[in-house]
Amino acid sequence: MTGRVIHTGQAIVDLVLTVPALPSAGGDVFATSHEITAGGGFNVMAAARRDGAAVVYPGGHGTGRFGDIVREAMSAEGVEVTQEPTTDLDTGFSVAIVDDDAERTFVSTLGAEGRLSRADLDAVATTGADVVYLSGYSLFHEGNGRVLLEWLPTLPEDTSVVVDPSPLVGEIPEERLRAVAARANIWTANESEARTLAARLGQPAPSPTVAELADALARRLDATVIVRANRDGAVVAGVGREPLRVPPHPVEAIDTNGAGDAHTGVLCAGLATGRGLEEAVRRANVAAAVAVTQRGPATSPTSAEIDALL
Ligand SMILES: Nc1ncnc2c1ncn2[C@@H]1O[C@H](COP(=O)(O)OP(=O)(O)OP(=O)(O)O)[C@@H](O)[C@H]1O
Ligand SMILES: Cc1ncc(CO)c(N)n1
Protein backbone atom coordinates (compact mmCIF):
# COMPACT_ATOMS: atom_id res chain seq x y z
CA MET A 1 0.00 0.00 0.00
CA THR A 2 1.31 3.44 -0.88
CA GLY A 3 1.02 6.25 1.60
CA ARG A 4 2.23 9.80 1.92
CA VAL A 5 4.98 11.44 3.92
CA ILE A 6 3.33 13.87 6.35
CA HIS A 7 6.04 16.40 7.14
CA THR A 8 5.34 18.11 10.46
CA GLY A 9 8.53 20.18 10.53
CA GLN A 10 8.98 23.68 9.26
CA ALA A 11 9.77 25.00 5.82
CA ILE A 12 11.77 28.15 6.42
CA VAL A 13 14.29 30.22 4.47
CA ASP A 14 18.06 29.82 4.79
CA LEU A 15 20.20 32.95 4.57
CA VAL A 16 23.58 31.40 3.92
CA LEU A 17 26.73 33.49 4.41
CA THR A 18 30.11 32.00 3.56
CA VAL A 19 32.99 33.47 5.57
CA PRO A 20 36.73 32.73 5.72
CA ALA A 21 36.37 32.29 9.50
CA LEU A 22 33.71 33.12 12.08
CA PRO A 23 34.42 36.45 13.74
CA SER A 24 34.62 36.41 17.52
CA ALA A 25 31.73 37.98 19.46
CA GLY A 26 31.46 41.66 18.58
CA GLY A 27 33.67 41.19 15.53
CA ASP A 28 33.05 41.91 11.87
CA VAL A 29 33.70 40.04 8.65
CA PHE A 30 32.73 40.25 4.99
CA ALA A 31 31.07 37.19 3.48
CA THR A 32 32.77 35.81 0.39
CA SER A 33 29.39 34.65 -0.98
CA HIS A 34 25.76 34.57 0.04
CA GLU A 35 22.59 32.76 -0.90
CA ILE A 36 18.89 32.93 0.01
CA THR A 37 17.04 29.61 -0.44
CA ALA A 38 14.22 27.50 0.93
CA GLY A 39 15.72 25.37 3.72
CA GLY A 40 15.00 23.71 7.04
CA GLY A 41 12.42 20.98 6.67
CA PHE A 42 12.05 21.78 2.99
CA ASN A 43 15.22 19.76 2.33
CA VAL A 44 13.64 16.63 3.81
CA MET A 45 10.47 17.13 1.75
CA ALA A 46 12.42 17.67 -1.47
CA ALA A 47 14.40 14.46 -0.89
CA ALA A 48 11.22 12.45 -0.26
CA ARG A 49 9.48 13.88 -3.33
CA ARG A 50 12.44 13.16 -5.59
CA ASP A 51 12.36 9.54 -4.47
CA GLY A 52 8.77 9.30 -5.57
CA ALA A 53 6.70 9.80 -2.43
CA ALA A 54 3.66 12.03 -2.11
CA VAL A 55 4.50 14.67 0.51
CA VAL A 56 2.09 16.75 2.55
CA TYR A 57 3.12 19.90 4.43
CA PRO A 58 0.51 20.89 7.03
CA GLY A 59 2.72 23.57 8.62
CA GLY A 60 2.50 27.32 8.47
CA HIS A 61 3.95 29.63 5.86
CA GLY A 62 3.78 33.38 5.87
CA THR A 63 2.84 36.24 3.64
CA GLY A 64 5.90 38.12 2.54
CA ARG A 65 9.10 37.60 0.63
CA PHE A 66 10.22 34.55 2.63
CA GLY A 67 6.79 32.93 2.38
CA ASP A 68 6.96 33.34 -1.40
CA ILE A 69 10.38 31.61 -1.50
CA VAL A 70 9.26 28.51 0.42
CA ARG A 71 5.91 28.25 -1.40
CA GLU A 72 7.62 28.48 -4.77
CA ALA A 73 10.15 25.81 -3.77
CA MET A 74 7.49 23.45 -2.39
CA SER A 75 5.38 23.94 -5.50
CA ALA A 76 8.38 23.23 -7.78
CA GLU A 77 8.95 19.91 -5.94
CA GLY A 78 5.25 19.01 -5.95
CA VAL A 79 4.69 19.16 -2.20
CA GLU A 80 1.03 19.36 -1.19
CA VAL A 81 0.60 22.42 1.01
CA THR A 82 -2.62 22.23 3.00
CA GLN A 83 -2.72 25.60 4.80
CA GLU A 84 -3.48 29.03 3.43
CA PRO A 85 -0.69 31.56 4.06
CA THR A 86 -0.80 33.27 7.48
CA THR A 87 -1.80 36.84 6.71
CA ASP A 88 -0.12 38.73 9.55
CA LEU A 89 3.30 37.07 9.61
CA ASP A 90 6.08 36.14 7.19
CA THR A 91 7.92 32.80 7.05
CA GLY A 92 10.85 32.44 9.47
CA PHE A 93 14.49 32.03 8.56
CA SER A 94 17.85 30.66 9.57
CA VAL A 95 21.05 32.63 9.27
CA ALA A 96 23.62 29.99 8.39
CA ILE A 97 27.25 31.05 8.59
CA VAL A 98 29.55 28.64 6.80
CA ASP A 99 33.28 28.85 7.39
CA ASP A 100 36.20 27.55 5.36
CA ASP A 101 35.98 24.10 6.93
CA ALA A 102 32.28 23.92 5.85
CA GLU A 103 31.36 24.07 9.56
CA ARG A 104 27.92 25.70 9.90
CA THR A 105 26.65 27.98 12.63
CA PHE A 106 22.87 28.43 12.62
CA VAL A 107 20.61 30.99 14.22
CA SER A 108 16.96 30.28 13.43
CA THR A 109 13.66 32.02 14.03
CA LEU A 110 10.18 30.83 13.16
CA GLY A 111 7.53 33.08 11.76
CA ALA A 112 4.21 31.68 10.58
CA GLU A 113 5.71 28.17 11.00
CA GLY A 114 5.60 28.59 14.79
CA ARG A 115 1.79 28.58 14.94
CA LEU A 116 0.93 24.97 14.16
CA SER A 117 -2.57 24.10 15.39
CA ARG A 118 -4.39 20.85 16.02
CA ALA A 119 -6.83 21.75 13.22
CA ASP A 120 -3.88 22.03 10.77
CA LEU A 121 -2.82 18.47 11.64
CA ASP A 122 -6.32 16.98 11.72
CA ALA A 123 -6.97 18.44 8.25
CA VAL A 124 -4.41 15.97 6.83
CA ALA A 125 -6.60 12.95 7.72
CA THR A 126 -3.55 10.70 8.18
CA THR A 127 -4.10 7.04 7.28
CA GLY A 128 -2.31 3.87 8.35
CA ALA A 129 -0.32 3.84 5.09
CA ASP A 130 1.16 7.28 5.75
CA VAL A 131 4.52 8.04 7.35
CA VAL A 132 4.63 10.92 9.81
CA TYR A 133 7.97 12.73 10.03
CA LEU A 134 8.80 14.65 13.21
CA SER A 135 11.93 16.65 13.88
CA GLY A 136 13.37 18.16 17.03
CA TYR A 137 12.94 21.58 15.45
CA SER A 138 9.18 21.28 15.91
CA LEU A 139 8.91 18.71 18.72
CA PHE A 140 11.00 20.83 21.07
CA HIS A 141 9.42 24.12 20.01
CA GLU A 142 7.18 25.24 22.84
CA GLY A 143 3.91 25.71 20.93
CA ASN A 144 4.30 23.32 17.99
CA GLY A 145 5.71 20.60 20.25
CA ARG A 146 2.69 20.69 22.56
CA VAL A 147 0.27 20.43 19.62
CA LEU A 148 2.25 17.56 18.05
CA LEU A 149 2.39 15.62 21.31
CA GLU A 150 -1.38 15.90 21.74
CA TRP A 151 -1.94 14.77 18.13
CA LEU A 152 0.40 11.75 18.12
CA PRO A 153 -1.86 9.45 20.20
CA THR A 154 -4.76 10.12 17.80
CA LEU A 155 -2.91 8.69 14.77
CA PRO A 156 -4.03 5.36 13.32
CA GLU A 157 -2.14 2.45 14.87
CA ASP A 158 -0.49 1.46 11.57
CA THR A 159 0.90 4.91 10.77
CA SER A 160 4.71 4.85 10.97
CA VAL A 161 6.13 7.70 13.01
CA VAL A 162 9.72 8.61 12.15
CA VAL A 163 11.57 10.97 14.50
CA ASP A 164 14.81 12.84 13.90
CA PRO A 165 15.33 14.45 17.32
CA SER A 166 17.88 16.99 16.04
CA PRO A 167 18.57 19.54 17.40
CA LEU A 168 18.75 18.30 20.98
CA VAL A 169 19.40 21.81 22.25
CA GLY A 170 18.91 23.01 25.79
CA GLU A 171 17.41 20.97 28.56
CA ILE A 172 14.79 18.83 26.88
CA PRO A 173 13.00 17.08 29.74
CA GLU A 174 13.25 13.30 29.67
CA GLU A 175 9.45 13.13 30.04
CA ARG A 176 9.04 14.92 26.70
CA LEU A 177 11.37 12.40 25.03
CA ARG A 178 9.39 9.60 26.69
CA ALA A 179 6.10 11.06 25.41
CA VAL A 180 7.48 11.02 21.85
CA ALA A 181 8.88 7.52 22.38
CA ALA A 182 5.46 6.27 23.41
CA ARG A 183 4.32 6.60 19.77
CA ALA A 184 7.47 6.76 17.62
CA ASN A 185 8.32 3.60 15.66
CA ILE A 186 11.60 4.74 14.13
CA TRP A 187 14.26 7.12 15.45
CA THR A 188 16.99 8.36 13.16
CA ALA A 189 19.91 10.49 14.33
CA ASN A 190 23.49 11.27 13.48
CA GLU A 191 26.13 9.78 15.73
CA SER A 192 26.73 12.76 17.97
CA GLU A 193 23.02 13.35 18.53
CA ALA A 194 22.48 9.66 19.13
CA ARG A 195 25.11 9.89 21.89
CA THR A 196 23.41 12.98 23.36
CA LEU A 197 20.05 11.22 23.23
CA ALA A 198 21.48 8.16 24.95
CA ALA A 199 22.95 10.36 27.68
CA ARG A 200 19.60 12.14 28.18
CA LEU A 201 17.93 8.77 28.56
CA GLY A 202 20.39 7.76 31.23
CA GLN A 203 22.56 5.54 29.05
CA PRO A 204 25.86 5.15 30.88
CA ALA A 205 28.55 6.83 28.75
CA PRO A 206 30.69 6.09 26.88
CA SER A 207 29.09 3.67 24.50
CA PRO A 208 31.97 2.39 22.39
CA THR A 209 30.78 1.52 18.87
CA VAL A 210 27.99 2.93 16.74
CA ALA A 211 26.33 -0.50 16.61
CA GLU A 212 26.37 -0.76 20.41
CA LEU A 213 25.01 2.78 20.67
CA ALA A 214 22.17 2.04 18.22
CA ASP A 215 21.37 -1.21 20.01
CA ALA A 216 21.28 0.46 23.44
CA LEU A 217 19.04 3.25 22.12
CA ALA A 218 16.66 0.79 20.48
CA ARG A 219 16.13 -0.91 23.84
CA ARG A 220 15.74 2.39 25.70
CA LEU A 221 13.25 3.74 23.17
CA ASP A 222 11.58 0.41 22.40
CA ALA A 223 11.80 1.28 18.71
CA THR A 224 13.83 0.83 15.56
CA VAL A 225 16.88 3.10 15.69
CA ILE A 226 18.96 4.25 12.74
CA VAL A 227 22.27 5.92 13.51
CA ARG A 228 23.78 7.83 10.58
CA ALA A 229 27.51 7.41 10.72
CA ASN A 230 28.87 9.83 8.14
CA ARG A 231 31.33 8.11 5.80
CA ASP A 232 30.63 4.78 7.51
CA GLY A 233 27.02 4.67 6.29
CA ALA A 234 24.39 3.80 8.87
CA VAL A 235 23.47 1.22 11.49
CA VAL A 236 19.94 -0.13 11.95
CA ALA A 237 19.06 -1.57 15.35
CA GLY A 238 15.88 -2.86 16.91
CA VAL A 239 14.64 -4.76 19.90
CA GLY A 240 15.31 -8.47 19.47
CA ARG A 241 17.56 -8.17 16.43
CA GLU A 242 21.27 -7.86 15.80
CA PRO A 243 22.34 -4.35 14.73
CA LEU A 244 22.82 -4.23 10.98
CA ARG A 245 25.50 -2.07 9.40
CA VAL A 246 24.30 -0.64 6.08
CA PRO A 247 27.45 0.28 4.13
CA PRO A 248 27.97 3.74 2.66
CA HIS A 249 27.92 4.50 -1.03
CA PRO A 250 31.56 5.51 -1.53
CA VAL A 251 32.03 9.09 -2.76
CA GLU A 252 34.37 12.05 -2.39
CA ALA A 253 32.50 14.45 -0.09
CA ILE A 254 32.50 18.14 -1.05
CA ASP A 255 29.77 19.56 1.20
CA THR A 256 28.18 17.35 3.85
CA ASN A 257 25.50 19.91 4.69
CA GLY A 258 22.05 18.47 4.13
CA ALA A 259 23.21 14.83 4.09
CA GLY A 260 21.14 14.04 7.15
CA ASP A 261 18.01 15.68 5.70
CA ALA A 262 18.43 13.83 2.38
CA HIS A 263 18.89 10.57 4.30
CA THR A 264 15.76 11.05 6.38
CA GLY A 265 13.66 12.22 3.43
CA VAL A 266 14.54 9.14 1.37
CA LEU A 267 14.07 6.87 4.39
CA CYS A 268 10.53 8.24 4.85
CA ALA A 269 9.83 8.02 1.11
CA GLY A 270 10.91 4.37 1.05
CA LEU A 271 8.65 3.47 3.95
CA ALA A 272 5.70 5.41 2.48
CA THR A 273 6.06 3.71 -0.90
CA GLY A 274 6.10 0.24 0.62
CA ARG A 275 9.81 -0.60 0.68
CA GLY A 276 11.26 -2.58 3.56
CA LEU A 277 13.31 -0.82 6.24
CA GLU A 278 16.66 -2.18 5.05
CA GLU A 279 16.02 -1.25 1.44
CA ALA A 280 14.87 2.23 2.52
CA VAL A 281 18.13 2.76 4.47
CA ARG A 282 20.23 1.53 1.52
CA ARG A 283 18.52 4.04 -0.73
CA ALA A 284 18.93 6.75 1.93
CA ASN A 285 22.70 6.07 2.09
CA VAL A 286 22.97 6.42 -1.70
CA ALA A 287 20.88 9.61 -1.74
CA ALA A 288 22.89 11.17 1.10
CA ALA A 289 26.15 10.20 -0.60
CA VAL A 290 25.04 11.94 -3.80
CA ALA A 291 24.01 14.96 -1.72
CA VAL A 292 27.50 15.31 -0.18
CA THR A 293 29.10 15.45 -3.63
CA GLN A 294 27.27 18.70 -4.39
CA ARG A 295 27.27 22.06 -2.70
CA GLY A 296 24.09 23.39 -1.13
CA PRO A 297 21.34 21.96 1.03
CA ALA A 298 18.56 20.44 -1.17
CA THR A 299 20.86 18.26 -3.29
CA SER A 300 19.10 14.91 -3.03
CA PRO A 301 18.88 12.81 -6.24
CA THR A 302 15.85 11.44 -8.08
CA SER A 303 14.60 7.84 -7.78
CA ALA A 304 16.14 7.01 -11.15
CA GLU A 305 19.54 8.33 -10.04
CA ILE A 306 19.35 6.29 -6.83
CA ASP A 307 18.30 3.15 -8.76
CA ALA A 308 21.23 3.59 -11.14
CA LEU A 309 23.72 3.71 -8.26
CA LEU A 310 22.33 0.82 -6.19
N1 LIG B 1 31.80 11.06 3.08
C1 LIG B 1 30.70 10.34 2.88
N2 LIG B 1 30.70 9.30 2.00
C2 LIG B 1 29.60 8.56 1.78
N3 LIG B 1 28.41 8.77 2.41
C3 LIG B 1 28.35 9.78 3.29
C4 LIG B 1 29.48 10.62 3.58
N4 LIG B 1 29.08 11.54 4.50
C5 LIG B 1 27.78 11.28 4.77
N5 LIG B 1 27.33 10.23 4.05
C6 LIG B 1 25.96 9.65 4.08
O1 LIG B 1 25.11 10.63 4.61
C7 LIG B 1 24.42 10.13 5.77
C8 LIG B 1 24.19 11.25 6.73
O2 LIG B 1 25.42 11.87 7.07
P1 LIG B 1 25.82 12.23 8.57
O3 LIG B 1 26.07 10.98 9.30
O4 LIG B 1 26.90 13.23 8.50
O5 LIG B 1 24.45 12.85 9.10
P2 LIG B 1 24.15 14.32 9.61
O6 LIG B 1 25.21 14.73 10.58
O7 LIG B 1 22.76 14.32 10.06
O8 LIG B 1 24.29 15.16 8.30
P3 LIG B 1 24.32 16.77 8.19
O9 LIG B 1 25.73 17.04 7.78
O10 LIG B 1 23.32 17.06 7.14
O11 LIG B 1 23.96 17.33 9.53
C9 LIG B 1 25.29 8.99 6.30
O12 LIG B 1 24.50 8.06 6.99
C10 LIG B 1 25.86 8.43 4.99
O13 LIG B 1 24.96 7.50 4.43
C1 LIG C 1 14.60 19.38 9.19
C2 LIG C 1 15.18 20.68 9.49
N1 LIG C 1 16.48 20.90 9.27
C3 LIG C 1 17.03 22.09 9.57
C4 LIG C 1 16.27 23.11 10.10
C5 LIG C 1 16.90 24.43 10.48
O1 LIG C 1 16.58 25.43 9.67
C6 LIG C 1 14.89 22.87 10.30
N2 LIG C 1 14.07 23.83 10.78
N3 LIG C 1 14.37 21.64 9.99
Image (cartoon, grey):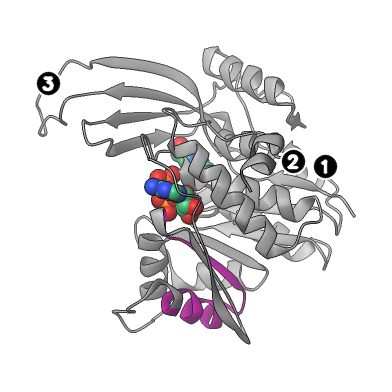
Residue 31 at x, y percent in the picture: 22, 17
The quadrant of the picture occupied by the N terminus is bottom right
- Which label was assigned to residue 28? 3
Residue 230 at x, y percent in the picture: 40, 54
Tell me where residue 61 sits by quadrant: top right
Residue 290 on the magenta span: no
Crowd band around label 1 with a 10 angstrom C-alpha radius: few (<14), some (14–19), many (20+): few
User: Upstream in the sequence, badge 3 or badge 2?
Assistant: 3
Query: Cα distance, mark 1 to mark 3?
Result: 47 Å
Q: Amino acid at mark 3?
A: Asp
- Left or right, 307 with reference to 285: right
Res. 42 visible in picture: yes
Q: Are marks 1 and 2 in contact (CB under 8 Å)?
A: yes
Tell me if residue 158 comes above or below residue 271 in the rendering: below
Q: Which residue: 67% across, 34% down?
A: 302
Magenta-highlighted residues: 212-230
Choose mark 1 or mark 3, whichever is in front.
Answer: 3
What residue did someone put label 1 on? 123
